[in-house]
Structure formats: C-alpha cells, structure tokens
Amino acid sequence: MKSIIILGSTGSIGTNTLDIVRRFPDEFRVVGLTAGSNIDKLETQIRQFTPQAVAVSTESSAALLRERCADLSVEIMAGDEGITQVASALDAELVISAIVGAAGLVPTLSAIRSGKHIALANKEPMVMAGKLMQDEARKHGVKIFPVDSEHSAIFQSLEGHRIEDVRRLILTASGGALWTLSQEQLLTVTPERALQHPNWKMGAKITIDSATLMNKGLEVVEARWLFNILASNIDVLVHRESIIHSLVEYKDRSMIAQLGLPDMRTPISYAMRYPARMALDLPSLDLTEIGQLTFSKPDHDRFPCLNLGYESLRVGGTMPAIMNAANEIAVEAFLNHGLRFIEIAHVIRSTMDAHTPQDITCLDDTLEADRWAREKAGSLVHALPH
Ligand SMILES: NC(=O)c1ccc[n+]([C@@H]2O[C@H](COP(=O)([O-])OP(=O)(O)OC[C@H]3O[C@@H](n4cnc5c(N)ncnc54)[C@H](OP(=O)(O)O)[C@@H]3O)[C@@H](O)[C@H]2O)c1
C-alpha cells in the first residue's frame, strides 16, 4: 500500500485524487492533507480518509477545525509552516502537489528535500524555480511525475524512447473559453464568461489562465524543466477538442501522441501508480463518435500571453517567476472585477518590462522575485483607470 500526502486536497485536482483513492482503498493510504480555508470540505475528507495530520492556511481556520474534529485523533496545523510540515515531516512515499499558484513552492520543495516522490499538478513552482526543483530532486533521488494532462501525455509518449532522438515536443491547447471571440468582443468579457471552459472543469485560476493562453505559456516553461528540453524545441498547437493531450516528434519525423477523453483522473492515476496503469471505470474514447479532430495555430495577437512564456525562458533567471507572480495578481484582480480581460496581458508585460533579471541561486532569490513582482503588478493594477 502506498502512503500519500495531498497538498490542496479540497481543490479540483485534490478531489479527483481522493476519488481515485476511494475507488482503490487497498492501494493507497492518505497520511496528510492540506487546504487553504475550505474547512467544511476538509472535515469531510478527514472523516472519510483518516489522515494522521492536516494543515490549513490560517490559525483561525485551524482552531475551528480542531473544535469540529475533537472526536478524531488527527493533528491539525496552521499557516505556511504547518502546510510545509505536513508536506515534509510525515512518512509518505508520494506527495500530490495540487495547491494553486506560488503558495505551493515551499511545501513542494520541502517534500522533495525530505525525499518523497512528487506527482506535480501545481505547475507554478516549476515555472518559478524549475532548475532548483530539478537539482534538488536529483540530489535527493526524487522522481517528479507530471500530472498536467499535456505533460503526462509527453511523459507517456517518451516512454521507451531516447531523449536525444526527440525533435520537438508539441503541447496541445484547447484555446480556452474565449478562443472564438474577436478582439472587440474580448474587450468586454466578464469573469463569469471566461470561466466557462469548453472541456475541463478546473479551479478558477487555471480556467482564466486557459482563456488568456497564459496556461500554455506556463506549460512551455514547465515542459522545459520537466523534460530538460530547450524552448525552441517546444511548440504549441491549438486543438479544440482536448482529445490528443500532446505529442512528441522524433528525429525520423515520427510522432507519438497520447489520446483520451478529457478527465484528469487518467493522468493523476498514472502519476500515482507509475509505471502501472489503474483500471479506471471511465467512459472509453470512441473516435467514431468524435468523427474529426481539428488543429490550428495559436493566435498571438488576441492571446499574447503564450509568447510571454517563451520570452520569460529566453531571458531566464528570475523572469519566469516575475511573469508567474504578475499573472497571479492580474488574474485575481480580473476575477474580482478589478481589471478587464485584455489588461491581464498588459499587467504581466509591464511587470516583466520593469524587471532587471537576476540569476536564481537559491530559494530566497525566487521568493524575492515573486515578492517584487506582486508589488509591482499590484501597483499597475491599482493605476489602471476604472
Ligand atoms: N484542475 C485541473 O484540472 C488542473 C489540470 C492541470 C494542472 N492543474 C494545476 O493544479 C493546481 C491546482 O489546480 P486546481 O484547479 O485543483 O485548483 P483549485 O481547485 O483552485 O484548488 C486549489 C487548492 O489549493 C488550496 N489553496 C489555495 N490557495 C492556497 C494557499 N495560499 N495556501 C495553501 N493552500 C491553498 C485550495 O484550498 P481551498 O479549497 O481551501 O481554497 C485548494 O485545495 C494548479 O497549479 C493548476 O494549474 C490543474
């Protein structure tokens, strides 16, 4: 039986992971869970999966949860320190890293440093500090298994092949909720409209990232570090149906792809039981029913965020962390009706332009860049006319 810790257990990836655990109770034992503030959901999860320890973002949420779980023998911790403690101190084989955003960096890195393998959904830490995370993983003999459907597809398409035979990685993109809208229509898009993703049911932040194509920009950076491949060998292909999850082209021009209906339980389960595949009771992909698959090039005029991902890699050092932090601030402001959809890219671009890139030699360099970019992006949002 594999013991696991889930960081971000109350989110979309977290609940899908627990659905797999529920279906295979003899395969996994949940020893730790963490959440932000959703203690209702976390309490239900604690009662069902009986972890040894859990953590939530604030002391007040932890105090409330302790009261509610007084009849249980679960240790309840609080704050960033508590979450990091759950990620690193408990005895477990695998940590499912599924917090959203930069908040996952320190706990995920601590889990790596404590020698636990990682199933990585939380892409932002890999964007902020990909080299550092990979160096630490190597040092501690830790494997990082991708959960993102595109990176899982590439991981699967690379199996049994030599990395030196790869010509390019091709990440597919659904195009998100706003792909068919004109530049004029994008001017007045509301958060509610941008949250209507055609294929995937995900957390709010990644759904907006999909609509701006920043998600694909982040994924290009994630792929660069996960597969140790240069950005010039990573392409993006718009594929609205989200059936081909990504492809690898080899030197002989042969392409290998992974296909399936869009359901995150497939890549999550692969990361959890690699190299075994779990017998998931899900609908099969019926290609005759699908009929045809479509492909097109990304539109960089309407969706400039994808190029920012490439640019951040070209500049290197702290720039991907700057881009990531500015995006988090801009997306949050958009969700709170504090800026327009098209201004998300403007805030990220202006924050990147104002930054003098530095090398990243340690975690503190990344955290300092993240802090600087949040402040800068926040002031840019504030200065926008409303
Ligand atoms: N959803 C998908 O299908 C999908 C696919 C590929 C990759 N990913 C990546 O996986 C990650 C999670 O995405 P998601 O869609 O599952 O997000 P989500 O539904 O918003 O869930 C986020 C989780 O993180 C917790 N959290 C939020 N802020 C936190 C903080 N400051 N400190 C500690 N915990 C915090 C949340 O707790 P509360 O519930 O208490 O707020 C929740 O458990 C993201 O990086 C995303 O890009 C997601």
Image: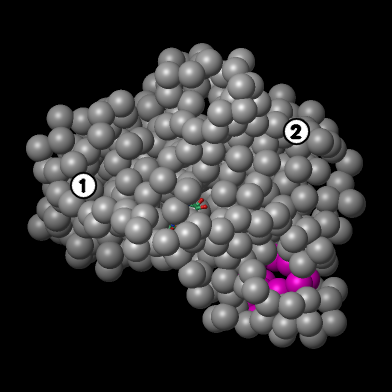
SS at mark 1 in the image = loop
Residue with the mark numbered 1: 280
Number of the label disc, if any, that sits on residue 234: none
Look at label 1 and name its amino acid: Leu
The residue under the point 60% across, 62% down is: 175
Is 205 drawn above or below residue 116 in the view shown? below
Q: Quadrant of residue 47?
A: bottom left
Q: Position of residue 178 (x, y in %)?
A: 63, 72
Q: Quadrant for ligand 1?
A: bottom left
Magenta stretch? 330-344
Q: Nearer the viewer, residue 239 or 384?
A: 239
> Can residue 245 be found in the magenta stretch?
no
> Can residue 339 be found in the magenta stretch?
yes
Q: Nearer the viewer, residue 216 or 353?
A: 216
Number of the label disc, if any, that sits on residue 232: 2
Q: Position of residue 255 (x, y in %)?
A: 54, 33
